[in-house]
Image: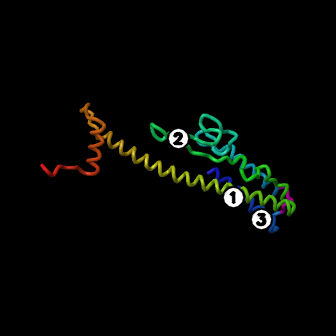
Amino acid sequence: TQMATIMDSLNDMEDMIDQINSGELDGTSAVVQSDFEALRDKITGTISGADFNGIAVLDSSQWGTDQIDANGNVYIQSNKDGGFNISFHSVDTPSSGVAWADLDGTDLGAAGTRATQLGYVQSLQSEMSAILDVYEGKEDSLQSQQLNLESQAQLLDQAAQLRKPSDPDYSLEQLLADLVARTTGTIFDGTS
């Protein structure tokens, strides 16, 4: 949702520049310039405040902790023997070469500097959109993995319910064999 907030703010900045270019807004107005900079500040605040379970997910200046390494990787242990990394993308210093501080409302007054601001906004929109697409793909993948884990958990719950507490010699192998037989049917020897 933080990336969506960033994209919405960039879209609002582009709309504001379009309204200045069409004459609906005055680019020399201190209020318009202040509104533009307020959107920039909303973006930078969103970046620095974006966290999940205490992990800064967008601001690389907060990385390099026990929870997230300096490259933005968070290790997820998915089973007793291992797991995988989820990599986050730093957006506090965009790779496009445009810094958030380059978005300057005082540059909206003149056509040339306004065009430069529009270029900055569009460059950042493109980069943030690509990152948002990556995150959406990761979300789909993690949701699929979640469904698989939930399915395994249901199987284990069923096995635990079948376990006979009165028979201490009832092994886990017997338990799983009984569960599979109950779920898929039994096998019988037709030669006897």
Point out the stretch of residues depicted in magenta: 26-31
Picture coordinates of residue 74, whole percent (x, y): 58, 41
* Marker disc for residue 82: none
Please identify the quarter of the rendering in which residue 130 is found: bottom right
* Marker disc for residue 76: 2
Secondary structure under badge 1? Answer: helix
At 60% from the left and 56% from the top, the residue drawn is: 133
Q: State how far apart marks 1 and 3 are (Cα).
A: 17 Å
At 72% from the left and 50% from the top, the residue drawn is: 94
**Amino acid type, mark 2:** Ile
At 57% from the left and 54% from the top, the residue drawn is: 136
Query: Which of pointers 3 and 2 lies earlier in the amino acid sequence?
Result: 3
159 vs 105, nearest the viewer: 159
Secondary structure under badge 2? Answer: strand
Q: Is residue 160 left or right of residue 110?
A: left
Q: Callout 1 environment at 10 Å: few (<14), some (14 to 19), or many (20+)?
A: few
